[in-house]
């Protein structure tokens, strides 16, 4: 499984080189990758349906108990198959849809990274590993949503998606760490056996809420739902892949995976149930005013995501069965319809349903695919969507004591979904042909072949559901509720209440479609205050954050280096002073000191050099004076038998002086001295800072200077580090990572200095 995940990352690295060699071959390889991954995971079907699981683990950070652990059971296999199969359709579709786009190579890199991250997420069995992949999906989706970065709306909504899902990710991380502390381990699969321990812990409520916030933001549940329709600014392949079949289901997967360990409590079940039901109905209703194909599909996606969440909240055996069937059905028909929306836009030049109609003769293949997917979405027999809808209704009806309320909400939400389906899947192809910006014609093979596979699978899985998906779903449920149900999946259950409600839903949806204009006209007369919109609070929080950032930047980082130094010194005085006050009384400090003649001379030189640096009117004089201070300190090291430290100090001071001289070579002359008030302030801060450092040194030397490290370094610098200069060995061996960080900082500073030196102004500039 590790190789299946890593394959995507490796492919993303080498794809640009492959495209340079042969562009068409590179695109074919991009489509073959998810197909190969699908075949690989499909080979585990028999193993999983026989009741087995596959676990693999590789050391990553063993000292912290963090490993690259992967776990394949029915739940993760189902998601892996969806991710790879829809990925194949989208990758193949992209080759034609984005033909001629100058950034197509970049697009393939982003979407491949996303696919690999999503696979890693659903396969991970380690809490930290899963979170890493979780964040990688957010980052890669940010690049994909903002792919058309020359458009301001794309940039704005990409940032919106990143901030919301990223904020939820922080909450999720905190919740997962609390759960790990309660359970004493990082393995997700082992948490299922610790349900009583976790749910009975005093920190369980906060952990559960934090995990749910992470899941709700990722799966666009109310009140975080608004980012998903806005993300439709992304290219159609992104909408089809991320926002219908995969990424938005990451939160759904998380709730399902954590259900055995965190579920069973009123807090967990009721929160999920209420949020899911509200999202299901509220977001479906929002679709009524939309005329853009992708926006309509986005709102119907929100409705289905709410339904899936509600089913997890119901938590009954039948509800979990409905959850899995509906999950598979939605991935197939919604991925298809998003790709169809892209085909229509690509071939006609518009996605506005009011400008589309009569395309059936000009785009017959596209029409057939759209109709098949639409029938599944509407819940028409014999497609998989029919099986899913009937099972959803059956699970809602049996829920006590609110079964009647839930079935009313479910029917109402599905009425809007039927309306959306007619508007998206039927209206563009039937009726009178309307003029479009481009002359319509059938799409290329690579664009309709992938959607056709997904649409036909909807038919096959519906007609043969008892054979094809029954066994897989039986073992998938073990990952959700920790037991096997053996509830049969069948296409036909006879003439029952669920069938009648399904027929009623379709009829009401058709009626809504024909009465849509009248309803919208009525709604347009009703105005709602902005304070009821969750998006208003997002905008308010974002604008407030930016305003505060501007204020603190103006106050703390206004470009005045003396202010920067003053802030640093003030913070040091405050924090260091607190530490000294809390020390518990002054130690026995011995202030008796009989300096030698050499020490007196060096001390005088130090004082004079410091005064010279402060009073200098030339930058060169100040730098030389600071260098004298450094060399004088190095002399003290020699006097106290630390020649290795002195040699290091000499090298540093020499390099520093040279670098400073290079930097100031082109700088303007000193500005006039600052005001008397500023100079008094600086004098006080400098005095307090010096006093603090002096006290710290006195406190330190008053304590016994015992150190095991001192002995260790002295004994091992030559034998292990192969160096006689102990300080150098400490820097390059024992503290190598710290030194590497310092080198990186210096390198970045050098690049900045070089860039500043390269700046040239013309005569009109200051």
Image (spheres, rainbow, N blue to C red):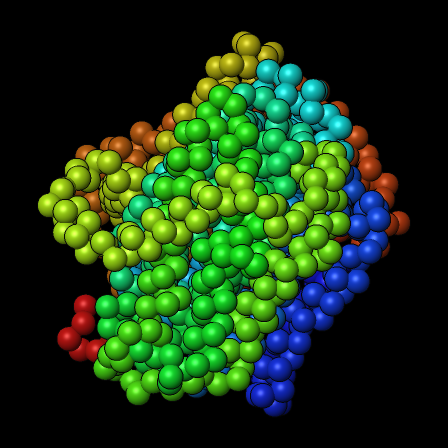
Q: Position of residue 584 (x, y in %)?
A: 55, 10
Residue plotted at (21% across, 36% down): 531
Q: Quadrant of the N terminus?
A: bottom right
User: 342 or 731, which is in the foreground?
Assistant: 342
**Image side of residue 339 versus residue 513, left or right:** right
- State which quadrant residue 275 falls in: top left
- State which quadrant residue 455 falls in: bottom right
Q: Outermost residue toward the bottom?
A: 22
User: 411 or 131, which is in the foreground?
Assistant: 411
Q: Position of residue 279 (x, y in %)?
A: 40, 40
Q: Outermost residue toward the top?
A: 585
- State which quadrant residue 755 falls in: bottom left
Q: Outermost residue toward the left?
A: 525
In the depicted structure, whether residue 439 falls above or below residue 88: below
Q: Position of residue 460 (x, y in %)?
A: 63, 64
Residue plotted at (79% across, 62% down): 43
Residue plotted at (50% across, 45% down): 499
**Image side of residue 194 versus residue 54, left or right:** left
**Image side of residue 281 versus residue 732, left or right:** left
Q: How many marks?
A: 0
- Residue 639 visible to the viewer: no
Q: Quadrant of the C terminus?
A: bottom left
Q: Position of residue 40 (x, y in %)?
A: 76, 65
User: 622 or 431, which is in the foreground?
Assistant: 431
Residue plotted at (55% across, 29% down): 398
In the depicted structure, whether residue 58 falls above or below residue 555: below
């Amino acid at each position: 499984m590790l190789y299946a995940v890593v394959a995507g990352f490796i492919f993303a690295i080498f794809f640009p080189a492959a495209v340079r060699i042969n562009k068409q071959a590179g695109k074919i390889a991009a489509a073959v990758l998810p197909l190969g991954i699908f075949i690989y995971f499909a080979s585990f079907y028999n193993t999983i349906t026989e009741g087995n699981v596959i676990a693999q683990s590789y050391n990553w950070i063993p000292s912290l108990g963090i490993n690259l652990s992967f776990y394949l059971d029915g739940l993760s296999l189902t998601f892996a198959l969806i991710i790879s199969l829809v990925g194949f359709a989208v990758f193949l579709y992209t080759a034609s849809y984005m033909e001629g786009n100058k950034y197509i190579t970049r697009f393939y890199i982003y979407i491949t990274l996303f696919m690999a991250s999503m696979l890693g997420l659903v396969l991970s069995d380690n809490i930290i590993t899963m979170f890493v992949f979780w964040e990688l999906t957010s980052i890669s989706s940010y690049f994909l949503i903002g792919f058309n970065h020359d458009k301001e709306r794309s940039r704005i909504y990409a940032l919106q998606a990143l901030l919301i899902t990223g904020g939820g990710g922080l909450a999720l991380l905190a919740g997962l760490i609390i759960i790990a502390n309660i359970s004493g381990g990082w393995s997700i699969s082992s948490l299922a056996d610790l349900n009583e321990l976790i749910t009975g812990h005093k920190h369980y409520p906060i952990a559960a809420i934090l995990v749910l916030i992470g899941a709700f933001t990722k799966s666009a549940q109310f009140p975080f739902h608004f980012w998903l329709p806005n993300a439709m600014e992304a290219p159609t392949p992104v909408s089809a892949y991320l926002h219908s079949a995969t990424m938005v289901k990451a939160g759904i997967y998380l709730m399902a995976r954590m259900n055995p360990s965190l579920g069973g409590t009123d807090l967990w079940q009721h929160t999920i149930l209420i949020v899911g039901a509200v999202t299901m109905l509220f977001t479906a209703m929002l679709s009524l005013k939309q005329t853009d194909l992708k926006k309509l599909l986005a709102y119907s996606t929100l409705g289905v995501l709410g339904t899936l969440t509600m089913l997890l909240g119901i938590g009954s055996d039948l509800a979990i069965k409905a959850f899995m069937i509906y999950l598979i059905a939605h991935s197939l028909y919604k991925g298809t319809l998003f790709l169809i929306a892209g085909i229509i836009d690509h071939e006609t030049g518009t996605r506005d349903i009011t400008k589309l109609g009569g395309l059936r003769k000009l785009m017959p293949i596209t029409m057939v695919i759209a109709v098949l997917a639409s029938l599944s979405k509407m819940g028409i027999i014999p497609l998989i969507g029919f099986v899913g809808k009937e099972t959803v209704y059956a699970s809602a009806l049996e829920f006590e004591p609110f079964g009647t309320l839930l079935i009313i909400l479910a029917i109402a939400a599905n009425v809007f979904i039927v309306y959306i389906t007619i508007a998206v899947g039927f209206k563009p192809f039937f009726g009178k042909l309307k003029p479009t910006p481009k002359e319509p014609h059938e799409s290329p093979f690579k664009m309709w072949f992938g959607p056709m596979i997904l649409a036909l699978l909807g038919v096959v899985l519906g007609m043969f559901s008892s054979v094809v998906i029954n066994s897989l779903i039986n073992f998938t449920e073990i990952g959700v509720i920790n037991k096997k149900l053996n509830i049969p999946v069948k296409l036909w259950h006879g003439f029952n209440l669920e069938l009648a409600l399904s027929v009623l839903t379709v009829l009401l949806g058709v009626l809504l479609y024909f009465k849509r204009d009248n309803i919208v006209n009525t709604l347009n007369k009703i105005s709602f205050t902005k304070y009821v919109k969750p998006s208003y609070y997002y905008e308010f929080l974002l604008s407030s954050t930016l305003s505060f950032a501007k204020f603190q930047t103006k106050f703390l980082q206004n470009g005045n280096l003396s202010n920067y130094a003053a802030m640093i010194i003030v913070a040091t005085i405050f924090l260091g002073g607190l530490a000294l006050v809390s020390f518990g009384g002054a130690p026995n400090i011995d202030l008796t000191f009989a300096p030698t003649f050499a020490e007196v001379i060096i001390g005088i030189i130090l004082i004079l050099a410091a005064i010279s640096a402060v009073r200098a009117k030339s930058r060169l004089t100040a730098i030389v004076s600071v260098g004298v201070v450094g060399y004088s300190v190095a002399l003290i090291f020699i006097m106290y038998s630390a020649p290795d430290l002195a040699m290091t100090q000499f090298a540093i001071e020499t390099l520093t002086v040279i670098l400073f001289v290079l930097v100031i070579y082109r700088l303007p002359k000193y500005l006039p001295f600052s005001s008397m008030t500023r100079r008094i302030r600086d004098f006080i801060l400098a005095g307090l800072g010096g006093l603090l450092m002096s006290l710290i040194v006195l406190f330190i030397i008053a304590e016994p200077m015992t150190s095991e490290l001192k002995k260790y370094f002295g004994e091992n610098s030559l034998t292990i580090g192969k160096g006689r200069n102990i300080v150098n060995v400490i820097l390059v061996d024992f503290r190598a990572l710290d030194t590497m960080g310092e080198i990186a900082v210096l390198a970045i500073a050098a690049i900045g200095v070089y860039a500043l030196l390269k700046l040239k102004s013309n005569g009109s500039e200051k």
